[in-house]
Image (spheres, rainbow, N blue to C red):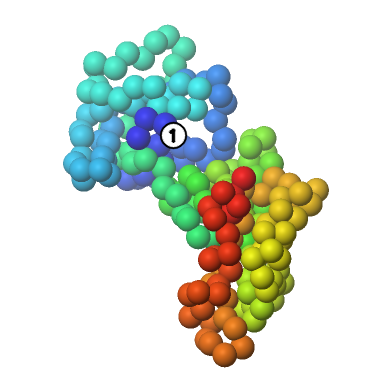
């Protein structure tokens, strides 16, 4: 819980905290807020949560956590904090709707089929130009001979699979991909998703699938 910024769920109308990337040098303290601990399900009332350099630096009872001079104080009375959520399987192509992730408490997403557009999204979000979640971006899907999704990279052997992964991470337009998704493809004789022994996922070990 102490590593990432929290998502604020407002019980009433008001500013959306995290609607734009925060200033790394800025400190913020949420006071008198109820913190939901996802590990135990407990609700801790009347808490102060202090953010320093984009990281949670302190959590505790209001009055016990110091709020040094210069720290922006946000009154969380009647409101709740949860750790920022991650959506681990996303296909999204419209920048105008990226803020919807934030207002629903999703501060990170994993794009399962990455394109240069997504890298532009991430660049603009990181620069503070657009509101949006953190992004982990995949390469093009690598699939077997009878691939399912148009545009997939089709491979037939383990050697082709390894070469396809290497190419994904060396092509200039895709050099910043974070991982390579492999689909359990079908052969001509078996339905999609039922190729457990010859599927592309069995061709590669985990070290070859991600940078």
Which one is in front, 131 or 55?
A: 55
Residue drawn 25% across the image and 36% down it: 34
Which one is in front, 98 or 183?
A: 183
Q: Position of residue 67 (x, y in %)?
A: 36, 14
Q: Quadrant of the C terminus?
A: top right
Q: How many marks?
A: 1
Which one is in front, 71 or 11?
A: 71
Residue drawn 49% across the image and 38% down it: 18
Helix, strand, or loop for circle 1?
A: loop
Say if 90 sits above or below 22 in the image.
Answer: below
Quarter of the figure with residue 42? top left
Residue that extends furthest to the bottom in the rendered view of this protein: 189
Q: Position of residue 77 (x, y in %)?
A: 28, 32
Q: Position of residue 130 (x, y in %)?
A: 64, 43
Q: Position of residue 185 (x, y in %)?
A: 57, 76
Q: Is residue 108 left or right of residue 124?
A: left
Q: Label 1, on which residue?
A: 5
């Amino acid at each position: 819980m102490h590593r990432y910024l929290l998502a604020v769920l407002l019980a009433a109308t008001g500013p959306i905290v995290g609607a734009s990337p925060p200033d790394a040098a800025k400190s913020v303290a949420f006071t008198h807020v109820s913190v939901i601990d996802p590990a135990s399900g407990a609700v801790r009332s009347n808490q102060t949560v202090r953010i320093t350099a984009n990281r949670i630096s302190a959590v505790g009872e209001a009055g016990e956590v110091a709020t040094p001079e210069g720290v922006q104080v946000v009154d969380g009375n009647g409101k709740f904090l949860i750790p920022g959520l991650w959506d681990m399987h996303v296909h999204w192509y419209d920048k105008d709707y990226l803020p919807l992730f934030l207002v629903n408490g999703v501060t990170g997403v994993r794009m399962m089929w990455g394109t240069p557009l997504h890298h532009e999204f991430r660049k603009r979000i990181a620069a503070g130009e657009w509101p949006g979640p953190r992004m982990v971006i995949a390469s093009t899907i690598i699939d077997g001979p009878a691939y399912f999704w148009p545009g997939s990279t089709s491979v037939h052997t383990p050697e082709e699979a390894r070469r396809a992964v290497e190419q994904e991470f060396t092509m200039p337009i895709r050099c910043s991909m974070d991982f390579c998704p492999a689909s359990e493809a079908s052969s001509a004789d078996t339905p999609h998703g039922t190729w457990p022994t010859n599927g592309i996922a069995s061709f590669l070990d985990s070290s070859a699938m991600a940078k």
